[in-house]
């Protein structure tokens, strides 16, 4: 039976960990960053809740690059790194007898890099996927272990896409673990000539500019909704979170109104003019809704 070390720090990690523990494979160590060191992850998950279900303990760390000796003591054949924002250094990649397996919610080699779920929705992609791959010293550049595709519908948001990624990853793990246990190592080289890299999202990327099209604003809001940090707009010099919005298809009569004007407020919903029409803000964090006629 192979020896596995599992490293993760987010809701996705917990879901995958539960899947693997439920398969009764030999996970000899579960590692998770201390919460204070994971403030960058809005979906941080302490893996101890899952570990306790299987009478396991969690080893907490600050920086994975400092844990070489601890990982060596566990003598892993495979290290799963599923949901960790820290890069795995070469001296840890060299420890397992078989290798390190990571995941990326995109169809590699396309869309390597940061925040792939967010950027996919912001950019209006109709398809994405999940790739499990053998980690190398590059960024999301290692050989592919398995890859599956899923659709992104206009009604999807960050939460629903995140759920698709979790469920599909669990399915892939269940179907492929037996191959690892039997010594069958699947590796498919990526075509790096087809690769592109998405950059780290900034706070400014999440700010709504009402001069955008209604579709662009809608995509931005659904991309950043929970479990992420939320899109925001500025009102009276304060950033206001916007969690849900809908495009209003009927905008006749508002063609000559500047973007950002509040044209209706009803039952805590706010209708605002955009660069090409109207959008309805449904879920938000305004302490008091702006008045009709105000500009955001």
Image: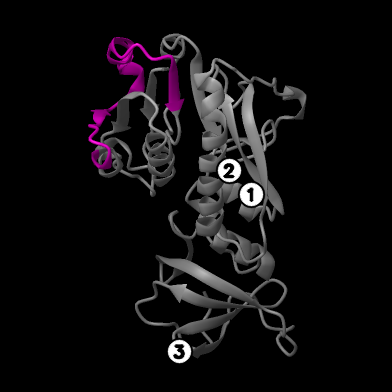
- Residue at the image point whose x is 28% and y is 27% from the top: 62
Q: Which residues are magenta?
A: 52-80
Q: Where is residue 258, by image quadrant? A: bottom right
SS at circle 3: loop
Residue contact between numbered discs 2 and 1, judged by CB atoms under 8 Å: yes
Query: How would you rate the neighbour count of disc 2 (Cα within 10 Å): few for under 14, some for 14-19, many for 20 or more?
Result: many
Which is nearer the N-term, disc 3 or disc 2?
A: 2
Q: Is residue 53 magenta?
A: yes
- Residue at the image point whose x is 72% and y is 73% from the top: 276
Seen from the viewer's position, the closer of residues 159 and 37 is 159
| Relative height, residue 161 to residue 168 (above, below) | below
- Residue at the image point whose x is 25% and y is 31% from the top: 58
Q: Is residue 159 magenta?
A: no
Residue picked out by circle 2: 116
User: Would you say residue 88 is visible in this rendering?
Assistant: no
Residue picked out by circle 3: 267
Rounded to the nearest angstrom, the CA distance separating label 3 from label 2 is: 35 Å
- Residue at the image point whose x is 36% and y is 38% from the top: 9
Query: How would you rate the neighbour count of disc 3 (Cα within 10 Å): few for under 14, some for 14-19, many for 20 or more?
Result: few
Q: Position of residue 237 (x, y in %)?
A: 41, 67
Residue picked out by circle 1: 120
Disc count in the image?
A: 3
User: Would you say residue 207 is visible in this rendering?
Assistant: yes
Seen from the viewer's position, the closer of residues 276 and 133 is 133
């Amino acid at each position: 039976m192979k020896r596995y070390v599992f490293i993760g720090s987010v809701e996705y990690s917990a879901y995958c960990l539960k899947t693997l523990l439920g398969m009764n494979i030999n996970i000899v160590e579960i590692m998770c960053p201390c919460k204070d060191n994971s403030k960058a992850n809005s979906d941080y998950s302490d893996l101890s809740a899952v570990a306790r279900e299987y009478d396991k303990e969690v080893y907490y760390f600050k920086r994975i690059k400092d844990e070489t000796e601890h990982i060596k003591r566990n003598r892993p054949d495979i290290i799963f790194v599923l949901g960790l924002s820290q890069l795995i250094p070469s001296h840890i990649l060299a420890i397992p007898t078989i290798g390190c397996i990571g995941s990326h919610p995109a169809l590699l080699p396309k869309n390597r890099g940061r925040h792939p779920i967010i950027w996919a929705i912001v950019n209006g992609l109709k398809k994405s996927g999940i790739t499990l791959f053998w980690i190398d010293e590059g960024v999301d550049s290692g050989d592919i272990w398995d890859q599956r595709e899923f659709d992104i519908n206009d009604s999807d948001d960050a939460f629903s896409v995140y759920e698709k990624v979790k469920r599909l990853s669990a399915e892939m793990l269940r179907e492929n673990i037996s191959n690892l246990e039997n010594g069958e190592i699947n590796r498919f080289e990526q075509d790096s000539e087809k690769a592109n890299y998405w950059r780290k999202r900034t706070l400014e990327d999440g700010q709504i500019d009402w001069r955008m099209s209604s579709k662009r604003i809608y995509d931005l809001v659904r991309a950043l909704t929970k479990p992420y940090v939320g899109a925001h707009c500025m009102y009276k010099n304060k950033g206001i979170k916007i969690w849900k919005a809908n495009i209003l298809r009927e905008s006749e009569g508002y063609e000559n109104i500047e973007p950002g004007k509040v044209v209706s407020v009803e039952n805590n919903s706010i209708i605002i003019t955009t660069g090409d029409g109207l959008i309805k803000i449904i879920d938000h964090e305004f302490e008091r809704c702006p008045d009709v006629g105000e500009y955001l």
